[in-house]
Image (tube, helix red, strand yellow):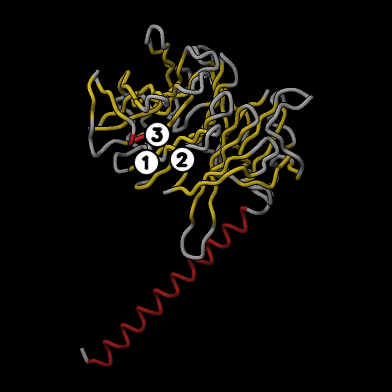
């Protein structure tokens, strides 16, 4: 083959690769534009005032709106007794969100020219920014304590899914009373099987707080196993309680946890089932939801939990009794990361 022919082939390859790249950019741009257009049959959404304190009209849900249109990804609200009704959008965008006692935690993306960056924003009851903290990776979990004094968040710093084993997380806890930030729970003393434990492969995620504003529960992963841990913020310790528990969520009365559990025999891409754990007896009860739920549930009250499953426009919310009875029911479409206020 002559040198001239080689140069022509190389030039053709460069042109082809450039064309493929341009086409990919155009398709991504077209997809983004499509998501900014409201879909027929979607919920009615208008811009308005969204508060993190209960309204005079009764309980409300504040959540990340996933419906396509100009308010996609914004925090929105609906009455708790009319979740499929018209939504009021706030103008504040979050990838993950939670709220309690008038305090909100919003994990946001800051769009960059080359790469996005992320931050955790503490919000007051009127969704005004109180403080912001840079994040080391992609947001995945967020929680506020029942009294509104503590906030926790988890990010992926390597990998992007809990389904496999090739990922790394970082979980932080912020005390809003003092401003103290524990940047990583990996700095806490781990008591595993009653003995101090250290390992380079430790990961934490999925914090849930008790009402005393000191105790928390979370997932610890190490040695290829996941563990439920109980943490003490004052002592800076975490103690293992049980294996094969992920993303616990503590009931309002503090007596039970609902969590996702890996069940042998299920697909590696959809390995979880929801279970409840009675903390007094340590008895597990499977919930009626038989689909794989990759979420940290939210309790609506002492009887019911809500969680997300993939939907046509990102995610839909479902509810199920927390005692193993009943059946799952769709709560609302195109929604994620709910907080029940009031």
Q: Residue 233: which quarter of the image?
A: top left
Q: Residue 239: which quarter of the image?
A: top left
63 sits left or right of 287 in the view = right
Q: Residues within 10 Å of mark 1 (few under 14, many from 20)?
A: many
Name the residue that disc number 3 marks. Answer: 205
User: Residue 298: which disc?
Assistant: none
Quarter occupied by the N terminus = bottom left
The local secondary structure at tag 1 comes to: strand
Q: Residue furthest top?
A: 281
Q: Residue 273: which quarter of the image?
A: top left
Q: Can you say whether 244 is above or below 97 in the image?
A: above
* Tag 1 and tag 3, C-beta contact below 8 Å: yes
313 sits left or right of 237 in the view = right
* Tag 1 and tag 2, C-beta contact below 8 Å: yes
Q: Can you say whether 122 is above or below 12 in the image?
A: above
Q: Residue furthest front?
A: 178
Q: CA distance from mark 1 to mark 2?
A: 9 Å
User: Residue 169: which disc?
Assistant: 1
Mark with earlier residue (3, 2):
2
The local secondary structure at tag 3 comes to: strand
Quarter occupied by the C terminus = top right
The local secondary structure at tag 2 comes to: strand
Q: CA distance from mark 1 to mark 3?
A: 7 Å
Q: Residue at x 47, y 32 (%)?
A: 295
Q: CA distance from mark 3 to mark 2?
A: 9 Å
Q: Residues within 10 Å of mark 3 (few under 14, many from 20)?
A: many
Q: Residue at x 35, y 37 (%)?
A: 163
Q: Residue at x 52, y 44 (%)?
A: 120
186 sits left or right of 89 in the view = left
Instruction: Where is residue 6? Give x, y as percent.
Output: 26, 87
Name the residue that disc number 2 marks. Answer: 140
């Amino acid at each position: 083959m002559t040198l001239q022919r080689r140069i022509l082939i190389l030039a053709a390859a460069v042109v082809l690769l450039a064309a493929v790249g341009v086409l990919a950019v155009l398709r991504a741009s077209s997809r983004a534009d499509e998501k900014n257009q409201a879909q027929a049959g979607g919920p009615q959404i208008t811009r308005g005032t969204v508060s993190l304190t209960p309204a005079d009209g009764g309980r409300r849900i504040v959540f990340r709106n996933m419906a396509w249109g100009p308010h996609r990804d914004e925090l929105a609200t609906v009455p708790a007794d009319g979740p499929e009704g018209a939504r009021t959008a706030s103008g504040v965008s979050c990838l993950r969100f939670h709220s309690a006692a008038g305090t909100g935690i919003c994990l946001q993306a800051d769009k960059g020219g080359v790469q996005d960056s992320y931050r955790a924003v503490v919000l007051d009851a009127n969704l005004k920014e109180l403080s912001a903290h840079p994040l080391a990776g992609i947001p995945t979990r967020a929680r506020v304590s029942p009294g509104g004094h503590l906030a926790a968040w988890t990010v992926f710093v390597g990998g992007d899914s809990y389904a496999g084993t090739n990922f790394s997380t970082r979980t932080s806890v912020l005390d809003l009373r003092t401003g103290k930030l524990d940047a990583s729970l990996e700095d806490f003393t781990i008591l595993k099987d009653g003995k101090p434990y250290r390992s380079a492969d430790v990961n934490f995620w999925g914090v849930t707080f008790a009402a005393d504003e000191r105790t928390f529960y979370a997932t610890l992963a190490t040695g290829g196993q996941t563990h439920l841990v109980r943490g003490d913020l004052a002592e800076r310790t975490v103690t293992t309680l049980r294996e094969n528990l992920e993303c616990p969520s503590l009931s309002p009365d503090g007596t039970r946890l609902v969590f996702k559990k890996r069940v042998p025999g299920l697909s590696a891409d959809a390995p979880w089932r929801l279970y409840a754990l009675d903390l007094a007896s340590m008895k597990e009860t499977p919930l009626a939801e038989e689909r794989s739920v990759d979420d940290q549930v939210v309790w609506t009250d002492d009887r019911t939990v809500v969680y997300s499953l993939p939907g046509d426009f990102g995610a839909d919310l479902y509810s199920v009794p927390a005692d193993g009875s009943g059946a799952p029911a769709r709560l609302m479409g195109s929604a994620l990361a709910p907080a029940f206020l009031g």
